Image: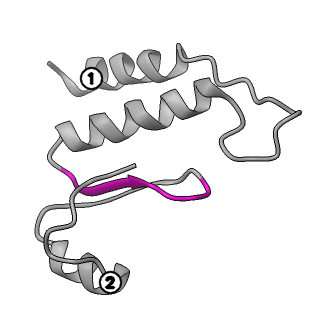
């Protein structure tokens, strides 16, 4: 698959998720669609071989590239056996 087709496929996949916010909620993410999109992005990052993929308490998806694990573990004070988690 060429890179342009790859990008289009993922753009459409992510854009098709209804992420309309819910103004009555005070939490982040404020809707089930936003949570779903975070989970989809996290799963995709893991499928690409990225490590320590997780969603923070403010709904930011974080990851690191292979080879950076030790540096990330040290900075985040993670145990060597910590796996990707939401």
Q: Position of residue 77 (x, y in %)?
A: 32, 84
Which residue does the image show at 21% across and 66% down from the upper left?
82
The numbered mark, 1 or 2, whose residue comes first in the sequence reads 1
22 w.r.t. 77: above or below:
above
Give the left or right position of residue 7, taking residue 18 as reference. Answer: left
Which residue does the image show at 72% across and 37% down from the upper left?
30
Q: Provide the secondary structure element on which disc 2 rests.
A: loop
17 w.r.t. 41: above or below:
above
In the image, which disc is placed on residue 6?
Answer: 1
Start and end of the magenta stretch? 50-58
Q: Position of residue 47 (x, y in %)?
A: 18, 37
- Which quadrant holds residue 19? top right
Foreground tag (1 vs 2): 2
- Specify whether residue 56 is painted magenta: yes
- Specify whether residue 76 is painted magenta: no
Determine the CA span between mark 1 and mark 2.
Answer: 35 Å
- Which quadrant holds residue 15? top right
In the image, which disc is placed on residue 23?
Answer: none
Which residue does the image show at 76% across and 30% down from the upper left?
21
- Mark 2 and mark 1 in contact (Cβ < 8 Å)? no
Residue placed under numbered mark 2 in the picture: 77
Q: Provide the secondary structure element on which disc 1 rests.
A: helix
Q: Position of residue 54 (x, y in %)?
A: 38, 54
| Quadrant occupied by the N terminus | top left
Compare residues 45 and 84 and report the one nearer the observer.
Answer: 84
The crowd level at tag 1 (other Cα within 10 Å; few <14, some 14-19, many 20+) is few
**Please, which residue is most extreme toward the right here?**
24
Q: Position of residue 23 (x, y in %)?
A: 87, 33
């Amino acid at each position: 698959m060429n890179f342009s087709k790859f990008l289009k496929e993922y753009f459409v996949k992510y854009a098709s998720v209804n992420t309309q916010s819910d103004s009555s909620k005070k939490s982040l993410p404020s809707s089930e669609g936003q949570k779903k999109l975070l989970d989809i992005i996290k799963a995709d990052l893991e499928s690409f071989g990225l490590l320590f993929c997780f969603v923070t308490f403010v709904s930011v998806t974080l990851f690191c590239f292979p080879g950076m694990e030790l540096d990330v573990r040290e900075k985040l004070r993670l145990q060597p056996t910590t796996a990707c988690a939401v």
